[in-house]
Image: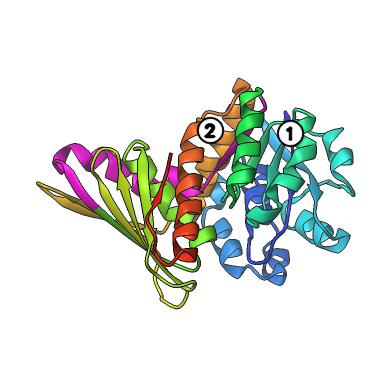
């Protein structure tokens, strides 16, 4: 049995409770609702038959506050509340860092990386090149670090990838989503990169605004992509793929399924002793994300990705 520790939480991110429930196979809907996530309770209830992942269990929880830790523990049957990273390191086989505040990931991850604990870091891995270089250097040393958006494993994206041979040469991809570029643009990037077999980006331009990103990405193979992230629109994550022979709209709605498959991939990786997702793929996406932020800061300047 793989004993997993969960680290959380950051505002608005329900992954500490939802991912723990998916793994442990149990949840307390009332506690999840009182934590502020009725939609999570609803999708866990709807998918109750597929909850639980054999061979793994979330056994430990660590947050910035003991009361928050206790609340999350009650939502998913987590037995042990930790008071420090060192306490968790001594008792678990792997860790899910379930916070989406990338500016804190390096500091929070370092004790587990130094201890050689297999680690999954929630999206986005980081938001600066200095932090990305740190993580890349640790991976080069052989440390187990895995990070991605669950949209890489979305069934809707996999179905689109299956349809690509019927679409001819892909000329353009457009993507639209709600909220901010850094925390939610990474979802759309992950989906696009996954569908297209992780092509190499060469340049990024962001001509939008802080609350309305409009980002154009050019790839080495000639593909052009535009990504639109708006704080104040309605809707789900949508990716439109335009080929010379056909086109397809990818409307990503099944969050539960992609979360579950993401967690399964991490657990399989721990069982196999190394991440099943190559770090180089994550690195390309984070470089694109950072370039989009930098372009906006520089007034829409084209940023090259080396």
Judging from the image, what secondary structure is the residue with disc 1 in?
helix
Relative depth, front residue between 73 and 8: 8
Residue 2, magenta (yes or no): no
Percent of width and height locating residue 172? 22, 52
Q: Is residue 173 above or below residue 165?
A: below
Percent of width and height locating residue 151? 45, 49
Mark 2, other Cα within 10 Å: few <14 / some 14–19 / many ≥20: some
Residue 149, magenta (yes or no): yes
Relative depth, front residue between 207 and 271: 207
For marks 1 and 2 on the same chain, the one whose residue lies earlier in the sequence = 1
The residue singled out by tag 1 in the image is 113
Q: How many marks?
A: 2
* Residue farthest left in this picture: 245
Q: Is residue 2 left or right of residue 266?
A: right
Q: Which mark is residue 279?
A: 2
Task: Tell me which residue sits at (57%, 59%) in the image.
Answer: 45
**Quadrant into which the C terminus falls:** top left
Q: Is residue 135 visible to the viewer in this orientation of the structure?
A: yes
Judging from the image, what secondary structure is the residue with disc 2 in?
helix
Percent of width and height locating residue 20? 68, 48
Q: Is residue 183 left or right of residue 194?
A: right
Task: Tell me which residue sits at (46%, 63%) in the image.
Answer: 298
Segment colored magenta: 143-172
Task: Tell me which residue sits at (74%, 33%) in the image.
Answer: 113
């Amino acid at each position: 049995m793989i004993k997993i520790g969960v680290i959380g939480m950051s505002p608005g991110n329900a992954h500490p409770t939802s991912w723990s429930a998916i793994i442990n196979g149990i949840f307390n809907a009332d506690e999840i609702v009182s934590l502020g996530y009725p939609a999570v309770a609803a999708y866990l209830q709807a998918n109750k038959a597929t909850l639980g992942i054999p061979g793994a269990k979330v056994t430990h929880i660590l947050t910035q506050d003991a009361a928050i830790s206790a609340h999350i523990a009650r939502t998913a049957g987590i037995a042990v509340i930790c008071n420090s990273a060192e306490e968790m390191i001594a008792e678990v086989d792997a860790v899910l860092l379930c916070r989406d505040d990338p500016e804190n990931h390096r500091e929070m991850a370092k004790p587990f990386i130094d201890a050689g604990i297999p680690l999954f870091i929630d999206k986005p891995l980081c938001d600066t090149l200095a932090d990305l270089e740190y993580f890349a250097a640790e991976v080069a040393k052989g440390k187990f670090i895995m990070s991605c958006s669950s949209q890489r494993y979305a069934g809707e994206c996999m179905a689109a990838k299956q349809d690509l041979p019927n679409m001819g040469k892909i000329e353009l991809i457009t993507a639209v989503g709600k909220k901010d570029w850094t925390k939610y643009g990474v979802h759309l990037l992950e989906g696009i990169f996954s569908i297209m077999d992780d092509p190499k980006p060469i340049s990024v331009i962001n001509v939008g605004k802080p609350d309305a990103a409009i980002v154009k990405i050019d790839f080495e193979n000639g593909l052009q992509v535009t990504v639109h992230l708006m704080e104040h629109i309605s809707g789900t994550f949508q990716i439109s793929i335009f080929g010379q022979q056909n086109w397809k709209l990818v409307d990503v709605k099944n969050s539960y399924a992609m979360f579950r498959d993401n967690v399964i991939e991490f657990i399989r990786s721990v069982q196999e002793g190394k991440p099943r997702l190559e770090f180089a793929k994550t690195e390309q996406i984070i470089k694109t994300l950072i370039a989009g932020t930098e372009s906006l800061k520089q007034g829409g300047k084209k940023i090259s990705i080396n």
